[in-house]
Image (cartoon, helix red, strand yellow):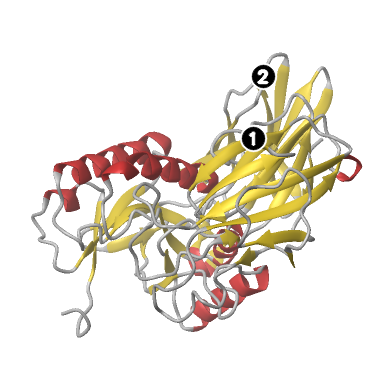
Amino acid sequence: MRNIDVINSNWLFSKEAKAAPASLPTGWQEVNLPYTWNGEDGQDGGNDYYRGTCFFAKSLKADELPAGEVKYLQFDGVNSSCEVFWNGKSIAKHDGGYSTFRVRIEDIKDENTLAVAVDNSPNDRVYPQNADFTFYGGIYRDVKVIGVGKKHFDLDYYGSPAIMVTSEIKGKDAVVEIKTFINDDDDCTVKYEIYADGEVIASAVGEEDDEVKITIENVHLWDGLKDPYLYTAKATLIYKGEEVDEVSTRFGCRTFKIDPEKGFILNGREYPLRGVSRHQDRPGIGNALLPEHHKEDLELIIEMGANTIRLAHYQHSQVFYDLCDEAGLVLWAEIPYISKHMPNGYDNTVSQMKELISQNYNHPSIVVWGLSNEITIAGAADPDLIRNHKKLNELCHEMDKTRLTTIASVTMCPIDAEYVHISDVLSYNHYFGWYG
């Protein structure tokens, strides 16, 4: 079965090193994760904070790794680009500082050196590059080692949990479709179970990675702040009669729509949205938040009377999405395609959107995927920008047929501009008494 260890302690850090070490270096600063090197200089509101490549390193002994024939590293957030080295060999690169990514580790010795080159320097291909927030450099979320058997639920597709749950309300019941993804599904079956309040209420068996449909009778709806009820779906991979891997996810059953006259409608009733935009940030530690910081943010937002949050302007921590599911907040989730279109950044917008949707599909709190934010603030939309938005819109609908897309247009953007009509929902950022 799957085993996971968090490896946040006892890292070494260097801003002066020129290359990733093949063995554990001496003279480097000792740090624990999460960590950003811009915790102080990125806090003054200016653009004079350090942006460049820094290095992290950690020793990992084979006998201290979690059990499992196959091992993966999971990085929950490294900003903005990084390259991962195992005993001096480059094993992965990742562009995008706000999403989970994984890499398989092989050639494991008795003692191993994990090194990560992290780069938040300016470039013309990885978003964001122009915005009014700090692009904190560092490994600022958890790092984990995952041990699994040779047959396991997939760990290679855009950091996804390898389980997708889609519910459709039919009268008083919900038809729940559950789909899993397996690295090698030959001779495998999957046992699916749905839990309510810790008890199994329904189950099914699927062949290989086929989806199954399970009916929940008299479904308990996820109903915003009033009653944010969550079920749990668990999938167990069975190979030759043995349970070899397991994944689970919480999910909620609800309906919603956005009406041009009535606004947001949740479970058939009008549900006016009033809320805030939220960044991940704290004095002294920048974006390297701990769970208690996410919890404090959520409590402050609810205390002020909000029922919705726009998660600006990137993918946030899974800790925060989970808290919003539990509290019943309605979310707008987006990628950092912001302020200025970069012709060389198309592939990065696609990969970041795939990660956003793959990793967050099961959160009932999310109702819209944001394609971009104020992307014409640096100039009018050109054909390449319009093409980029159309492709992203198509991608969202291919990956998720249950949610809508939106674009945040800056206040001076003309209402008849072509690009503002690409998404399902049009949104405007107005700054009365500020910019105009």
Q: The C terminus is located in which quarter?
A: bottom left
* Image position, residue 385 (x, y; %): 21, 46
Residue in front for this viewpoint, 308 or 3: 3
In the image, what residue occupies the spot 74% across and 39% down?
87
| Residue position for label 1 | 155
Residue nearest the viewer, comparing 370 with 368? 370
Q: Type of residue at label 2?
A: Asp
The residue positioned 60% from the left and 67% from the top of the image is 288
Q: Residue at x 53, y 52 (%)?
A: 363
Residue 232 in sight in this render: no
Secondary element under disc 2, as helix, strand or loop, is: loop
Residue 116, disc: none
How many numbered marks have been drawn onto this rendered protein structure? Answer: 2
Q: Please say if 427 is above or below 173.
A: below
| Foreground pick, 51 / 285 | 51
Q: Position of residue 50 (x, y in %)?
A: 49, 68
161 to 98, vertically: above or below: above
* Residue linked to disc 2: 185
**Closer-to-camera residue (189/20):** 20
Q: Position of residue 168 (x, y in %)?
A: 47, 41
Q: CA distance from mark 2 to mark 1?
A: 14 Å
Please give left or right for residue 30 compared with residue 242 in the image.
left
Q: State yes or no: discs 2 and 1 in contact (Cβ < 8 Å).
A: no
Residue type indicated by callout 1: Leu
* Quadrant of the rendering where the N terminus is positioned: top right
Secondary structure at numbered mark 1: loop
From this viewpoint, which residue is outermost toward the right? Answer: 63
**Residue 309 in sight:** yes
Instruction: Give whichever of discs 2 and 1 has the lower sequence position.
Output: 1
- Disc 2: CA contacts within 10 A as few (<14), some (14-19) or many (>=20): many
Residue 117 x, y percent position in the rendering: 60, 50
Residue 349 position by quadrant: top left
